[in-house]
Amino acid sequence: MPLTYPHLLPKNDPRFIKWKESLKKRPSPWSAGQTKYTHPSLKKISAARKKVDNFAKWRKKAKKLGKIPSSYPPFKRNEHLACLIGLVLGDGHIDKFPRTEKLTISLGTDKPDLIDFGIMLIKKVFNKEPSINRPINVNVVRISIYQKLISKRLGVPSGNRRWSKKGIPQWTKRKKGYLLACLKGLYEAEGSLCIHLPTCTYNFAFSNSNPKLLEDVKLSLVRLGLHPEIRPLAIRLRRRNEVEYFSDLIKFRKYDAGWSNGSLVALWKRKSRFKS
């Protein structure tokens, strides 16, 4: 049943028609075409409204009920966090806002298992359900989550990281399992494995435009006893035994539940496995 408003004049009423015509003769509002950047009065109004916190009572009550956290302590350092950091360094972006931050990880729709893997990592680390969005006419899925101090707690800079001096976090380099988990996240995001059996060509490449991140990946591979090739925008493994070994070591494109239960450490080999 359509809504009716008996107190309003019908549109064919002469009084309504006269009133509507009179609107055309009225002068424009004093603020028309102005913004807080061009008019001092609007700037003053904007500043006054920012001081009013309309959600203060709700936020206080929600904290008491445990709906929102009252503080944001550092994340627990484990393989899930290390792998998520690698995934963020590769395909993630952190936006900073006045009161919160937003983490977005963009993954191709041709890798549904990787999308599920990314969602699982965010749930494990943040203990919160992320939002999933697939833009129209784009073959990508964006996994995003809002929370305070994301950049600081992950150790990943916000904004454009093209020339960032922060690469693989130092704490992940102190434990073999953490380093392998971080490398897994990096290679799942930016890695490509190409094998051409007729010519016996093997290429396991990590591609990125950040020099610091490329250098960290190279040093990590050398630490594993591998012999990476250095390119301006990529680090490659070309030897067959090294490609097979490393792809198996980080369980590339494998997302079974046991990958973070110490299995990466169990696969660690002696540095002398490969000869120069």
Image (spheres, rainbow, N blue to C red):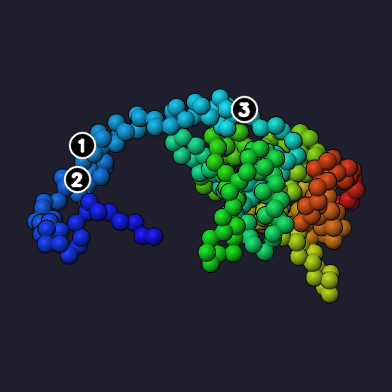
Seen at 54% across and 41% down, the residue is 146
Which residue in the structure is indicated by mark 1?
Answer: 41
Asked if the residues shown at circle 3 and circle 1 are in contact, with their CB atoms under 8 angstroms apart, the answer is no
Seen at 20% across and 49% down, the residue is 32
- Closest to the camera, between mark 3 and mark 2, is 2
- Compute the Cα span from label 3 to label 2: 45 Å
Residue 194's quadrant in the figure? Answer: bottom right
In this image, 84 relative to 9: left or right?
right
Seen at 79% across and 60% down, the residue is 238
Residues packed near mark 2 inside 10 Å, few (<14), some (14 to 19) or many (20 plus): few
In this image, 1 relative to 107: left or right?
left
Q: Which of 171 and 76 is in front in this view?
A: 76
Say how many tags the image has: 3
Residues packed near mark 1 inside 10 Å, few (<14), some (14 to 19) or many (20 plus): some
Seen at 76% across and 56% down, the residue is 253
Name the amino acid type tagged 3: Pro
Which residue in the structure is indicated by mark 2?
Answer: 31
Q: Where is residue 99 in the image (x, y as percent from the top left)?
A: 46, 35
Which residue in the structure is indicated by mark 3?
Answer: 73
In this image, 105 relative to 32: left or right?
right
Q: Which of 274 and 98 is in front in this view?
A: 98
Asked if the residues shown at circle 2 and circle 1 are in contact, with their CB atoms under 8 angstroms apart, the answer is yes
- Compute the Cα span from label 2 to label 1: 9 Å
> Is residue 232 among the parts visible in the rendering?
no
**Secondary structure type for disc 2:** loop
From what the image shows, is residue 27 above or below residue 146? below
Q: Which of 18 and 49 is in front in this view?
A: 18
From what the image shows, is residue 84 above or below residue 236? above
Quarter of the image that includes the N terminus? bottom left
**First along the sequence among labels 2 and 1:** 2
